[in-house]
Amino acid sequence: MVSKFRLWAVMLLCEAGVFAASQPNVVIIFLDDSGWADFHPFGNPLYETPHVQKLAAEGCRFNNFFVPQAICSASRSALLSGCYPGRTRVFGAHGPNGRGLDPKFATMGEVFRKQGYKTAIFGKWHIGDRPETRPPARGFDESAGLMYSNDMWEYHPVDPEHWGKFPLQYWSNGEVICERVTPEFQKSLTTRYTERAVDFIGRHNDHPFFLYVPHSMPHVPLFVSDKFEGKSGAGLYGDVIQELDWSVGQIIQALENNGLAGNTIVIMTSDNGPWAGYGNHAGKTPFREFKATGFNGGTQSACIIKYPGKLKAGSSSGSMFCSVDLLPTLCRLTGAALPENEIDGRNVWPLISGQPDAQNPHVYYPVSTGKKFNGVMGGDGRWKLHLPHGYRHIVAYGKDGQDGKYENRQIELSLFDLKADPYEKNNVINEYPEVAEKLRRLAAEHKKKFYK
């Protein structure tokens, strides 16, 4: 006869097994320099993107998703750590051998691995190129890809002599497997990342996993595999976007083939807006300015989240939240513990899931460009205050892989009503002085705390 103690123990184990089985998988597809309007249904490009459209039809489209800084390393660090650039001191885009994100700040990889998840990154890392800051040391069981941007190589269009000193390498699980990436190799990047992601899903269909796929594209220089070259009818940029769309479809299909689609959170977005100076090799955004500025054209990214049974299929949301909020929100959904270090993100699941009367827990979000603090956005998503600062503005677009020409401009202390003016055209600081003063005080407090 089974003792009461053994029966109780078996029941506990069964309950634990059920709980473990119910833990959702997490997949984050993070594009590089993709424009807000590059994919249907956000924009209406000349080429088709059926797989992203399908993802939107099965999930929720978020129209007011932001990153705190519109530059590669700062944006990726904010996503993976849940911390603002001012806290981590990860600004701009780090080059080869850069230390990147200090290990004292936990990454999503470390957070999920502590929760018992299998973890993987296949794509562009760009938050550390030293042994202690590469993916194997930052919580990822499997990894493959580039340690930094694909233009940091000998064919750089502006400064090839400088970047040619550092061979662009392709890594796999902590080892360099391609000592010097060639143009032909770059054509295979999107396919390589996708195939590794699909393989990972197939090998871990019986265990919770966190899969991070930060594509190198459509960051310049643009490369596309032979199977998509010339297929979009909209030039090389359209070809690249269609291959990325294919990649999304392959990952979603792998989840479906392995019976995982119903218990997987899929998030697709971009690290920032388009590098618009590259003209026909850049994406599109309806918002003001572009990458590497504090305007919405740089910081506002298209975002789709699919979580069957939790988010209404085919829905659209105007709720505002930021990439730093994804880590704590995913911790809430998976049962993972928050990092021991202080973070800036907050759980915004009530906003994401559309709960009645849900409010953003942030009073404000900071906006920066490199080491320069640009201003703040109110947590309610309506107001944005620009402190006086300089920024680059395009005066002539480049073509076929060459950058354009810019001029330096200045913006005075300015307040924008994003509900009425999401394009930041009309400074309403004189009409709403109380609002401007409140945000100015918040900006001053943030600057004092993080930009000493």
Image: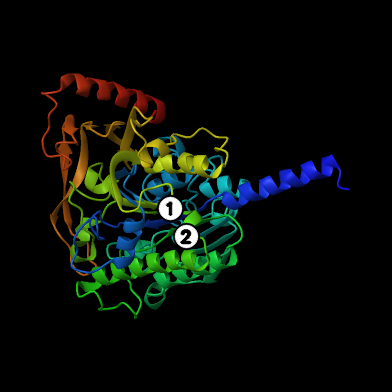
Viewer-nearest residue: 134 or 114: 114
Type of amino acid under label 1: Pro
Percent position (x, y) of residue 134? Answer: 54, 55
Assign the C terminus to one quadrant of the image.
top left
Percent position (x, y) of residue 7? Answer: 80, 44
Q: Who's the residue at 36% across and 77% down the image?
A: 225
Viewer-nearest residue: 403 or 364: 364
- The answer to whether any part of residue 120 appears in the image is yes
- Total labels: the figure holds 2
- The answer to whether any part of residue 271 appears in the image is no
* Relative vertical location of residue 228 with respect to residue 282 in this rendering, above or below: below
* Relative vertical location of residue 364 with respect to residue 270 in this rendering, above or below: above
Mark 1, secondary structure of its residue: loop
* Relative vertical location of residue 363 with respect to residue 321 in this rendering, above or below: above
Q: Which residue is the site of mark 1? A: 308
* Relative vertical location of residue 234 with respect to residue 84 in this rendering, above or below: below
Type of amino acid under label 2: Ala
Q: Earlier in the sequence, mark 2 or mark 1?
A: 2
Viewer-nearest residue: 80 or 203: 203
Instruction: Examine the image and state in which quarter residue 228 appears.
Output: bottom left
Residue 107: which numbered mark, if any?
A: none
> How many neighbours does mark 2 have within 10 angstroms: few (below 14), some (14-19), or many (20 or more)?
some
Circles 2 and 1: CB atoms closer than 8 Å: yes
Q: Which residue is the site of mark 2? A: 261
Percent position (x, y) of residue 102? Answer: 52, 43
For residue 330, side relative to residue 340 (left or right): left
- Residue sitting at the far bottom: 226
Mark 2, secondary structure of its residue: helix
> How many neighbours does mark 1 have within 10 angstroms: few (below 14), some (14-19), or many (20 or more)?
some
